[in-house]
Image (cartoon, rainbow, N blue to C red):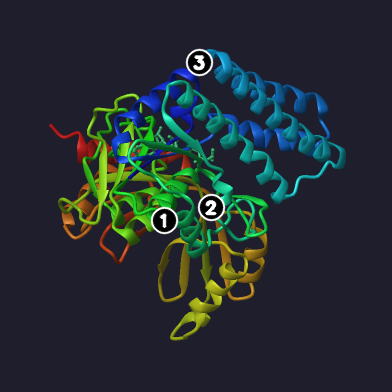
Amino acid sequence: MVVMKFGGTSVQDADRMDRVLSIAEEELNEGVVLVASATAKTTDRLIQLTQASARGDEESVQSILNLIKTHHFQIAHDFLEGEYLEKAVARLETLFAELGTIVKGMTLLKEVSPRTLDAVVAFGEILSTTLLYHRALQRGLKARLLDSRNYIITDDSFGNATPDIRETYRRLSSGVKVGAGDLVIMQGFIASTPDGTTSTLGRGGSDYSAAIVGAGLHASRIEIWTDVHGVMTADPRIVPEAQPIPQLSYEEAAELAYFGAKVVHPSTIQPAVEKNIPVLVKNTMDPNGPGTTITHRSPYKGLKAIATKRSITLITIQSYRMLNAYGFLSRIFDVFAEYRTPVDLIATSEVSVSMTIDNKANLHSITRELSKIGKVVVEEEKAIISLVGEDVWKTHETILNAFSALQGIPVRMITMGSSHINLSLVVADRDGEESVRRLHRAFFEKG
Ligand SMILES: Nc1ncnc2c1ncn2[C@@H]1O[C@H](COP(=O)(O)OP(=O)(O)O)[C@@H](O)[C@H]1O
Ligand SMILES: N[C@@H](CC(=O)OP(=O)(O)O)C(=O)O
């Protein structure tokens, strides 16, 4: 059995949805679980909808709602007919009536809790899979539509919930049977708490859903279908010369994903690693292309790709009380733990510690607490540039070449992951893209 995940751009309209079903059909003899995201832009629009409701801005609420409605009804009319169209339209009407009721409540109260936000954004995936399902039936496929909320069970951290993996695997293995010829359609991103309240796995979370479903059902592989040729040597939006990487290790892929190569969601890799299931990243617009295969082993040592993470905050804490002291770092990290803020990079000297964080939600409180320990300097608008590959910094040429490529661009911090897999630099955000382009030129565009 294969799990195939299709992202928002892969299901953006009727043509793409048809393409997706053709790709899935090719693999139906193995049995397919198709995990789909909301159509491109829909999740953003649903979030805008909640923001407009919170302002009590009824005019914007109606216009966003109409945009989402028109788009989905258009898809239904574009590729469905007869009873399939009738059934799909009836289902869409019901879904939009439910959404309308929630939105009315929000607009009246001018209040949107994280729980309500999840209830609203979940409609994106429910709508897209409803359309895929009816089209699959019209195409004569043996299709079933499941609600992921009955299988993926999380805690109540709405907006970025953590799955209860054991319960989720239990429900998947007892409730989802996939035989040869079967097409099971499920939603990415959405889940529920044990009492049935809708939750979500965080933005971009459909990859994670696919990996959880793949691991829970012992899939032979997990395919992530997207709008690029695979994991590339750099973000192709920044570097048009970027090339697909045929093979990567889980560790390399996780590092790249975490440090900004958003083609694969960072958590995706984890459930696949644990069950040793290969992850393939492929292009919906070029299904016969090789894509990227992510497995346990790296095919060769050295640099594979350059990733970048923007809008980073660098926090430096300095104190002479650090000299020869112990327990200092733990006091610092307790502050980050208290405010549930992950630290990405860290560099220390005898009297100072520099750290980067991505999430600024609690920056003010964190700074206030850290000031009790030492002098704190906060620098915003930074970018992390990561050179990733097994043993990437073991050869001194990588470091020499990197610094010579970056001549004239001030490097604020440098760290080398102890796993030898990541050499990261911090530069000003405005220098981020130029740094990636120069490094890519130096390492991948020679000759
Ligand atoms: N190293 C990289 N390789 C491939 N794509 C990358 C990389 N870094 C960033 N990206 C971006 O990731 C995008 C695909 O991710 P995403 O938008 O989440 O797709 P989807 O909607 O299919 O889930 C690509 O369009 C690309 O611009
Ligand atoms: N629709 C959700 C989940 C997701 O993963 O989408 P995509 O696969 O298009 O990145 C989001 O936009 O965050």
- Horizontal side, residue 116 vs residue 142: left or right: right
Q: Which residue is mark 3?
A: 79
Q: Is mark 2 within 8 Å of ligand 2?
A: no
Label 3 and label 1: CA atoms lie apart by: 33 Å
Look at the image and tell me in which quarter the C terminus lies.
top left
Helix, strand or loop status at disc 2: loop
Q: Report the image quarter containing ligand 1.
A: top left
Look at the image and tell me in which quarter the N terminus lies.
top left
Q: Amino acid at mark 1?
A: Gly
**Which residue is drawn at the image coordinates 48% and 43% (left, top)?**
206
Q: Amino acid at mark 2?
A: Tyr
Q: Which residue is mark 1?
A: 216
Label 2 and label 1: CA atoms lie apart by: 10 Å
Q: Amino acid at mark 3?
A: Phe
Circles 3, 2 touching at the beta carbon (< 8 Å): no
Measuring from the top left, give residue 35's x and y in whole percent. Answer: 45, 40
Q: Which residue is mark 2?
A: 151
**Which residue is drawn at the image coordinates 38% and 55% (left, top)?**
215
Work out whether residue 107 or residue 438 is closer to the camera in this orientation and state it: 107
Circles 2, 1 touching at the beta carbon (< 8 Å): yes
How many C-alpha atoms fall within 10 Å of the one at disc 2: few (<14), some, or many (≥20)? many
Measuring from the top left, give residue 44's x and y in whole percent. Answer: 60, 34
Work out whether residue 422 or residue 75 is closer to the camera in this orientation and state it: 75
Work out whether residue 201 or residue 413 is closer to the camera in this orientation and state it: 201
Instruction: Count up the numbered dots.
Output: 3
Label located before the other in sequence (3 or 1): 3
Label located before the other in sequence (2 or 1): 2
Measuring from the top left, give residue 335's x and y in whole percent. Answer: 59, 71
